[in-house]
């Protein structure tokens, strides 16, 4: 039956499950709204329909159960678009209620959302207009997963690649059929596989408001590019779909996941449950505000018209309210069960550790529910363990399964490589898995996500090319973005033709990545760093959906030497289980071997010189974790002059040079077949360089 054959007959329906559910006799709609006094369901043929073809007013006596409003629309076909309107009291300052019967709302449980009719700026200027809201889509398509299931990979073997779905293939040089989409990313899977990463970590892919930017930013033709402005937590972002008007959101996302899994690559999704796109009291009403503002958001105890903001984005989700906790768990389990994702990275996750009044909780229910969920038991669960209001929980995030972006690791490694002195003991701790952060809480190196760059901040090349941020293109007067970059430009700010400085920068970039892949814990590589992508010194490209924020595929040729180095570095890590331990390096003898798991040195053997505040040198020897594995000897020289390092001598074993960041390609990293045996008992490491030897 065509959706145009209205009016459709209705039945009371039922409150569970929430959202739109296709059944044998029609579609059941259900939403939560505790204090609403009336509800209307509006049905549209498509995302761009000017008027609904049917408006269904719900009778509170037959279409309401407890706090849910529900209705069954008999014979309604999948593909129908819909919105809700809720009536109720508007008393934001005393009770936090913000009901407005003029505004159409997006179903929080919608499986697909389209935004054709949404104009944030017109509403801001003129107020709510009829039928101007994003619309949900009724979905019921079957999908053949072809026996696909979420991947199960030991955490210690994981190598994460953080990538923006849109920016990865939107550049004209990408050469894909559907730039900036899930399908476009599929075409780049051979590249990802050749690189050697095991998981992609996709920046937000849930439906977000691209118009959520300040006025001046929008007026400059910029939009919300990164996507940390979610309003559809069950829907893939329509902007990353080829035919979202046809409701293909799920199919296109699933096609991408299935293709990645076939290549042995897992999918981690960056999720934003700390705030939403609705902002503060001046922001739009799209979903939660209109269904249960007082339930879904943290509000001031005295004036509930004020939103508590621990995220820097205008509001904070009341994540530990029982209903909101259930909503979050429902969404996460849906993405695992129905979309086959392999894990999640939680943006500003510490905001989720706060109660309704904003106080940090010792045992936040939502975090423990995630920790203990059977459905999420095999998923990678990663926290950005801080928020915008100073709650910093790296090393203390609740639970065992929670991994954390290790900000302490990032800062220590950046400072060491740029030349800060007196860091050698802490560098050793970071290389060993950050036991000072995790061991006391019975956690392990695999709880640490080690990174030197991420989407938020400088790229790798900019980190070695700029001393300060250059964010004027964001049209916020260079006020946005951090000022504490822990970077060093090598002597000249930004672009230069000085061959000596360029050589130093390339060496520094290799040093930073080498340390990351030689560390215990889980390495995370920012997409584009392997080809030295630049953002021209912009350390906050959240609104730069243009060449500043895109992956330029011509760099594969321009900086092919770096791409080769990173591939070799990843291969080096993969062939050495001693770099992938589940336990901290301790210096204890490895069971079954007569060697300590690690021995620390300086330029002299077994003399790391821990107490020297001027020291910039460290070396260490790793025992094999498996009989077939080679030994490793690593030398770090971040000083300004070349240093001669003594080499350990073991009976029946020779050393072979595997990596030297001071060398040019192709001898900067070498496979075992290309290595040459060292004949001396010592070796010279150039200034600001790293060397790795394999022993066999």
Image (cartoon, rainbow, N blue to C red):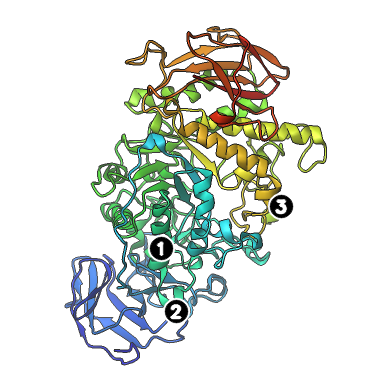
Is residue 458 shown to the viewer in this render?
no
**Above or below — where is 668 with respect to 5?**
above
Q: Nearer the viewer, residue 632 or 608?
A: 632
2 or 1: mark nearer the eye? 1
Residue beneath disc 1: 255
- Give the Cα separation between the discs numbered 2 and 3: 36 Å
Per the image, the residue denoted by label 3 is 472
Which residue corresponds to the image point at 42% horizontal and 47% vertical from the top-left? Answer: 346
Q: Nearer the viewer, mark 2 or mark 3?
A: 2
Q: Earlier in the sequence, mark 2 or mark 1?
A: 2
Q: Which quadrant of the figure has residue 498?
A: top right
Question: Would you identify the image quadrant in which residue 44 lies?
Answer: bottom left
Q: Give the residue displayed 46% in from the left and 40% down from the top.
A: 159
Question: Mark 1 or mark 3, which is nearer the start of the sequence?
Answer: 1
Between 145 and 31, the one nearer to me in the picture: 145
In the rendered image, residue 345, in percent from the top left (x then y), is placed at 42, 46
Q: Is residue 503 visible?
A: yes
In the figure, is residue 606 to the left or right of 595? right
């Amino acid at each position: 039956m065509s959706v145009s054959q209205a009016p459709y007959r209705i039945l009371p329906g039922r409150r569970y499950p929430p959202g739109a559910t296709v059944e044998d006799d029609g579609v059941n709609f259900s939403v939560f709204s505790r204090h609403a006094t009336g509800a209307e369901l509006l049905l549209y043929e498509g995302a761009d329909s000017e008027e609904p073809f049917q408006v269904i007013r719900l009778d509170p006596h037959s279409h309401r159960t407890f706090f849910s409003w529900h209705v069954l629309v008999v014979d309604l076909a999948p593909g129908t678009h819909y919105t809700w309107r809720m009536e109720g009291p508007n008393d934001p300052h005393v009770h936090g209620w913000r009901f407005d019967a003029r505004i159409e709302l997006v179903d929080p449980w919608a499986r697909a959302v389209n935004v054709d009719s949404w104009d944030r700026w017109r509403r801001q200027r003129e107020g709510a207009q009829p039928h101007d809201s994003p619309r949900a889509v009724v979905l019921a398509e079957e999908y053949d997963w072809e026996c696909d299931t979420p991947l199960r990979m030991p955490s210690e073997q994981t190598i994460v690649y953080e990538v923006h779905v849109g920016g990865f293939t939107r550049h004209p040089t990408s050469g894909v059929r559907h730039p900036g989409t899930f399908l476009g990313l599929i075409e780049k899977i051979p590249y990802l596989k050749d690189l050697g990463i095991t998981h992609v970590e996709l920046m937000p892919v849930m439906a977000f408001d691209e118009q959520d930017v300040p006025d001046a930013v929008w007026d400059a033709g910029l939009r919300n590019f990164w996507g940390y402005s979610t309003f559809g937590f069950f829907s893939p972002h329509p902007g990353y779909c080829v035919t979202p008007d046809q409701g293909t959101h799920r199919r296109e996302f699933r096609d991408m996941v299935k293709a990645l899994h076939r290549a042995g690559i897992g999918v981690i999704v960056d999720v934003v449950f700390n705030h939403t796109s609705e902002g503060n009291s001046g922001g739009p009403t799209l979903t939660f505000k209109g269904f249960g503002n007082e339930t879904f958001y943290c509000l001031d105890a005295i004036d509930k018209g004020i939103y508590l903001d621990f995220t820097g984005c205008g509001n904070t989700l009341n994540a530990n309210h029982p209903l909101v906790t259930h909503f979050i768990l429902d969404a996460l389990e849906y993405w695992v069960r129905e979309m086959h994702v392999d894990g999640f990275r939680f943006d500003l996750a510490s905001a989720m550790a706060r109660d309704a009044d904003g106080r940090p909780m010792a045992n936040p229910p939502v975090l423990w529910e995630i920790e203990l969920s059977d459905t999420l038991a095999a998923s990678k669960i990663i926290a950005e363990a801080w928020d915008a209001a100073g709650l910093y929980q790296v090393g203390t995030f609740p639970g065992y399964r929670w991994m954390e972006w290790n900000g302490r690791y990032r800062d220590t490694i950046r400072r060491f490589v740029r030349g800060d002195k007196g860091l050698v003991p802490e560098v050793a701790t970071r290389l060993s898995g950050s036991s000072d952060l995790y061991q006391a809480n019975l956690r392990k190196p695999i709880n640490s996500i080690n990174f030197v760059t991420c989407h938020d901040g400088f790229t790798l090349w900019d980190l070695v090319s700029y001393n300060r941020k250059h964010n004027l293109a964001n049209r916020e007067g260079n006020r946005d973005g951090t000022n504490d970059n822990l970077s060093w430009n090598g002597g000249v700010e930004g672009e230069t033709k000085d061959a000596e400085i360029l050589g130093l920068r390339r060496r520094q970039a290799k040093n930073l990545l080498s340390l990351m892949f030689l560390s215990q814990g889980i390495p995370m590589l920012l997409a584009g760093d392997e080809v030295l992508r630049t953002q021209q010194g912009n350390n906050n490209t959240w609104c730069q959906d243009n060449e500043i924020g895109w992956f330029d595929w011509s760099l594969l040729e321009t900086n092919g030497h770096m791409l080769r180095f990173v591939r070799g570095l990843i291969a080096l890590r993969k062939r050495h289980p001693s770099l992938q331990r589940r336990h901290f390096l301790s210096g204890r003898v490895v069971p079954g071997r007569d060697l300590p798991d690690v021995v620390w040195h300086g330029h002299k053997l077994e003399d790391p010189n821990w107490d020297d505040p001027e020291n910039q040198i460290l070396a260490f020897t790793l025992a094999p974790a498996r009989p077939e594995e080679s030994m490793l000897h690593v030398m770090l020289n971040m000083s300004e002059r070349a240093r001669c390092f003594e080499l350990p001598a073991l009976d029946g074993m020779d050393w072979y040079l595997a990596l030297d960041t001071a060398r040019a390609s192709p001898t900067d990293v070498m496979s075992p077949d290309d290595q040459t045996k060292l004949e001396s008992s010592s070796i010279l490491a150039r200034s600001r360089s790293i060397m790795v030897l394999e022993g066999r």
